[in-house]
Amino acid sequence: MTVQQTIHDARKIVIKIGSNTLAKSDGTINFAFMQDFARQCGALAEKGKQIVLVSSGAQVAGVSTLDRWARKKDIHYRQALCAIGQVELMDKWRSAFGEFGLHIGQLLLTKEDFADDHRTLNMRNTLFTLVDEGVVPIINENDSVAFDEIRIGDNDNLSALTAVLWSADLLILFSDIDGVFTDNPKTNPAAELIENVRNISELRTHIIIGSANSFGTGGMATKIEAAERTTSYGIPMILANGGREHALDQLAAGTMKATLFEGENI
């Protein structure tokens, strides 16, 4: 199976945007990227696709709004920064999608929400209602009240949980790397892109997993965990570089390389 065919066959798509994809080099939010990404989502919607977006970037947006806190590391400042940034982030997404006639809705979640059956049912019903009415749900961790989410920053696994909850056909993780490599391509030019993964346990024995970079707090480890979760439910996952020009368009057209984790047959 190819990335292009996988996107073509999928109707319900969860897309995760990482902080590094949303941030400019100075650490502030990249609104031009958000506008172009909204356009690309609109193009998929016109083809009958349904989109749920998991968006990191509350801290990035907070820095854009109140840069005097940018270097403060105290947890209370970081959580307060997310409270400020979440408003700015959603305002920017609202403006970006609004340019293409799309409305958005916000859901702020924690891992605990997925552990409670009543909350899970309500989350699922809300997702289906929003999407059925043509609204794009935008999900983020509730960073302002959950210390673990700020420390781990695990929107990769949050997007996987969302894909399973919504019974999605595909999860796309946009990061600042082209996919899974045999080693870190930023430090090892000989590292090779792995384009198809059918056995994640075997993959782990052939790659070197590094740590997260500056703006994001995830890393390759959480992306592979996300792939394990979704593929075990038969949902394929694509890991691609969201910083490439028109990345979603290119993936759909088959003109950009990425890593496809193929879903297990269940």
Image (cartoon, rainbow, N blue to C red):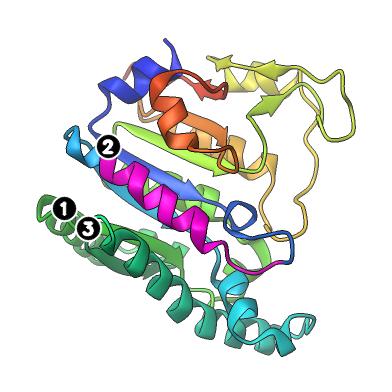
**Separation of marks 3 and 2 at Cα, in angstroms:** 12 Å
Decide if residue 141 is on the left or right side of residue 189: left
Residue 205 drawn in magenta: no
Position of residue 130 relative to residue 82, above or below, is above
Q: Are marks 2 and 1 in contact (CB under 8 Å)?
A: no
Q: Which residues are magenta?
A: 27-43
Q: Which residue sits at x=57%, y=24%?
A: 258
What residue is at 41 percent from the left and 32 percent from the top?
249
Crowding at mark 1 (Cα within 10 Å: few <14, some 14-19, many 20+): some
Q: Position of residue 221 (x, y in %)?
A: 68, 41
Measured from the top left, where is residue 244 in percent x and y?
Answer: 58, 37
In this rendering, does residue 72 appear at all?
yes
Between discs 3 and 1, the one toward the N terminus: 3
Mark 3 touches mark 1? (CB < 8 Å): no
Q: Is residue 144 visible?
A: no
**Rounded to the nearest whole Å, what is the CA distance between mark 3 and mark 1?**
16 Å
Q: Which mark is residue 102?
A: 3
Left-right relation of 60 to 232? right
Q: Amino acid at mark 2?
A: Leu
Q: Secondary structure at mark 2?
A: helix
Q: Is residue 33 magenta?
A: yes
Density class for disc 3 (Cα within 10 Å; few <14, some 14-19, many ≥20) is some
Report helix, strand or loop for mark 1: helix
Q: How many marks?
A: 3
Q: Residue 92 or 104: which is nearer the viewer?
A: 92
Task: State the image coordinates of residue 177 (x, y, percent, origin top left).
Answer: 67, 37
Q: Nearer the viewer, mark 3 or mark 1?
A: 3
Tell me the number on the disc at residue 44: 2
Of the numbered discs in the image, which one, if any, rests on residue 114? none
Write down the residue under mark 1: 128
Q: Is residue 8 above or below residue 156?
A: above
